[in-house]
Amino acid sequence: MEVNDFKEKRETIRRKVLLDIRFLDKERDIQGNGFSCDISPKGIGLFTRQYLAPHSSIEIWIENPSQKSLHLKGNVVWSKAIDFSIYRIGIELEASDLKTLNEFLETT
């Protein structure tokens, strides 16, 4: 019998939400788009075709058809190839953006 010892380390629960996301890494001159797979007031799980290196500072625009886009800043925590040219990226959001994101999530 397999024992599952997984323990959630996140302080906040992530919501599974599919939103279009644009991003910009000015330092490495990388811009692109993707979509969220989950989101919380502290972070975003992102699927994209562009590799973003851990420790990169990025700007993010979350697109929501019922509202104008939301601009946030964050840092790439991890980046993992999940398929040929598709990456899953973990992004930690800057604390200054948390209130704005909370309000945005309440309307989605």
Image (cartoon, rainbow, N blue to C red):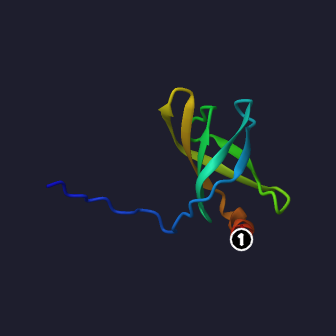
Residue marked by disc 1: 99
Place of residue 41 in the rendered image (x, y in percent of width and height, measured from the top left): 62, 65
Q: Amino acid at mark 1?
A: Lys
Place of residue 86 in the rendered image (x, y in percent of width and height, measured from the top left): 56, 33
Toward the right, the furthest residue is: 68
Residue beneath the point at 48% across and 68% down = 11
Toward the top, the furthest residue is: 84
Place of residue 32 in the rendered image (x, y in percent of width and height, measured from the top left): 73, 35
Left or right, residue 30 beside residue 2: right
SS type, badge 1: helix
Residue 78 higher or lower than 92, as above or below: above
Looking at the figure, which quarter contains the N terminus? Answer: bottom left
Left or right, residue 49 beside residue 60: left
Looking at the figure, which quarter contains the C terminus? Answer: bottom right
Q: Could you tell me how many numbered marks the image carries?
A: 1
Residue 47 higher or lower than 84, as above or below: below
Residue 30 in which image quadrant: top right
Left or right, residue 31 beside residue 3: right
Residue beneath the point at 59% across and 62% down = 42
Place of residue 57 in the rendered image (x, y in percent of width and height, measured from the top left): 66, 44
Residue beneath the point at 39% across and 63% down = 8
Residue 82 higher or lower than 21, as above or below: above
Residue 69 in which image quadrant: bottom right
| Front in this rendered view, residue 92 or 70 | 70
Q: Residues within 10 Å of mark 1 (few under 14, many from 20)?
A: few
| Front in this rendered view, residue 70 or 29 | 70
